[in-house]
Image (spheres, rainbow, N blue to C red):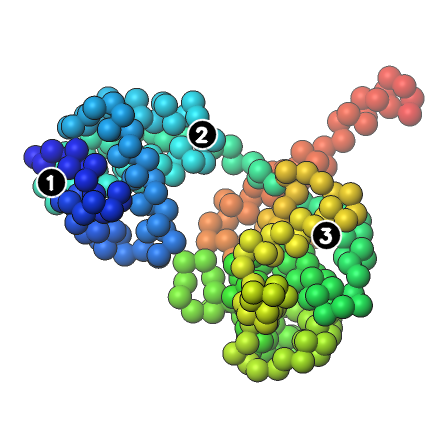
């Protein structure tokens, strides 16, 4: 078997030795997106640095467990899960290629709480945020349209920034926005634009004076990228700013909260689990069920009944 500490002279550290080629072969085998490639490279770099710090040339199963346990002490569970997953995938591949035994087989990562890490807005909070946006400027009209779209459809920020004007079309009797589903290469699913949302978007486009079908639906207002495509970071920032404008300041309230808001309000208003799954384009209904479980506890009024029995309230 190859001595894996050839790793330290790798493409990861830009030294270009055997492991760099090995890593490239592994990435090509995965046949994944550039973003995932970058994520796995960063994760493997952490593993390489850890091996170097311990003076480990030929890691064994106990080393992988020790690495995971040290990660747990320093990082949140989602990060641990990612780093360990990268290592497990890598060694699974090295064994398949008869390069090194799969020493990470059946090693568990970190237990991740299935509850959402971000909170939804209440219907009144959502309305307050939208009403608090000054729509007298083009930027204000844009921001209002973005938040109204995200709150009513549950779209992710990446879908918002990748939307083009030409993605607004009609299906049956509805105006819809086509977007790329997670893991897909084409814009193959859509969300419906309700009348207030469609009006907000068209008012923004009219103020912007842009009608080319290939142009971004929502354009940047920054000096360096004026009229260019926005970034997920810029959308996240503007959402946080508008939340803060009405006093909603919390680490648990972010742009992703708007997706949770759409799911929660849909269920509260009588939408079914299947409808909510379709709205959010979840491939696994168990992901959608998390919202239902959260509402089961929210609708449990045990405390009020007990209080009434004691205090007569």
Q: Earlier in the sequence, mark 3 or mark 2?
A: 2
Q: Residue at x 9, y 41 (%)?
A: 98
What label sits on residue 242 in the rendered view?
3
Give 46 or 155, whichever is nearer the viewer.
46
Give 265 or 311, whichever is nearer the viewer.
265
In this rendering, would 59 be left or right of 84?
left
Element type at mark 1: loop
Q: Residue at x 41, y 58 (%)?
A: 183
174 is higher (above) or lower (below) than 7: below
- Locate residue 71, reporting x and y percent: 38, 27
204 is higher (above) or lower (below) than 250: below
Location of the C terminus by quadrant is top right
- Locate residue 93, reporting x and y percent: 19, 43
254 is higher (above) or lower (below) than 224: above
What label sits on residue 75 in the rendered view?
2
Q: Earlier in the sequence, mark 1 or mark 2?
A: 2
User: Badge 2, how many Cα within 10 Å: few under 14, some, many 20+?
Assistant: few
| Residue farthest bottom in this picture | 212
| Residue 162 showing in the rendered view | yes
What label sits on residue 99 in the rendered view?
1
From the image, state whether disc 1 or disc 3 is nearer to you: 3
């Amino acid at each position: 078997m190859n001595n894996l500490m050839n790793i330290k002279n790798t493409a990861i550290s830009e030294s270009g030795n055997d492991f760099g080629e090995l890593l490239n072969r592994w990435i090509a085998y995965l046949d994944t997106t550039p973003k995932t490639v970058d994520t796995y490279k960063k994760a493997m770099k952490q593993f390489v640095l850890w091996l170097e710090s311990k003076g480990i040339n030929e890691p064994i199963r106990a080393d992988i467990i020790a690495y995971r346990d040290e990660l747990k002490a320093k990082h949140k569970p989602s990060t641990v899960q990612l780093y360990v997953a990268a290592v497990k995938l890598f060694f699974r591949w090295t064994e398949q290629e008869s390069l090194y035994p799969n020493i990470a087989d059946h090693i568990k990562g970190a237990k991740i709480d299935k509850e959402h890490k971000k909170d939804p807005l209440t219907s009144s909070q959502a309305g307050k945020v939208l009403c608090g946006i000054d729509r007298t400027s083009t930027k204000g009209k844009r921001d209002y349209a973005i938040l109204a779209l995200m709150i009513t459809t549950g779209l992710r920020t990446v879908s918002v920034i990748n939307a083009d004007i030409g993605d607004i079309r009609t299906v049956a009797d509805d105006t819809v926005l086509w977007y790329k589903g997670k893991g897909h290469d084409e814009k193959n699913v859509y969300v419906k634009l309700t009348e207030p949302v469609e009006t907000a978007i068209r008012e923004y486009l009219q103020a912007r004076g842009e009608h080319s079908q290939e142009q971004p639906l929502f354009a940047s207002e920054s000096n360096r990228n004026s009229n260019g495509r926005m970034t997920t970071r810029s959308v996240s920032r503007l959402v946080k700013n508008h939340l803060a404008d009405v006093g909603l300041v919390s680490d648990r309230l972010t742009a992703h909260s708007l997706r949770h808001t759409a799911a929660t309000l849909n269920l509260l208003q009588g939408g079914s689990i299947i409808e909510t799954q379709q709205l959010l384009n979840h491939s696994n209904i168990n992901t959608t069920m998390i919202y239902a479980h959260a509402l089961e506890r929210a609708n449990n009024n045990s405390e009020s009944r007990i209080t009434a029995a004691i205090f007569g309230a």
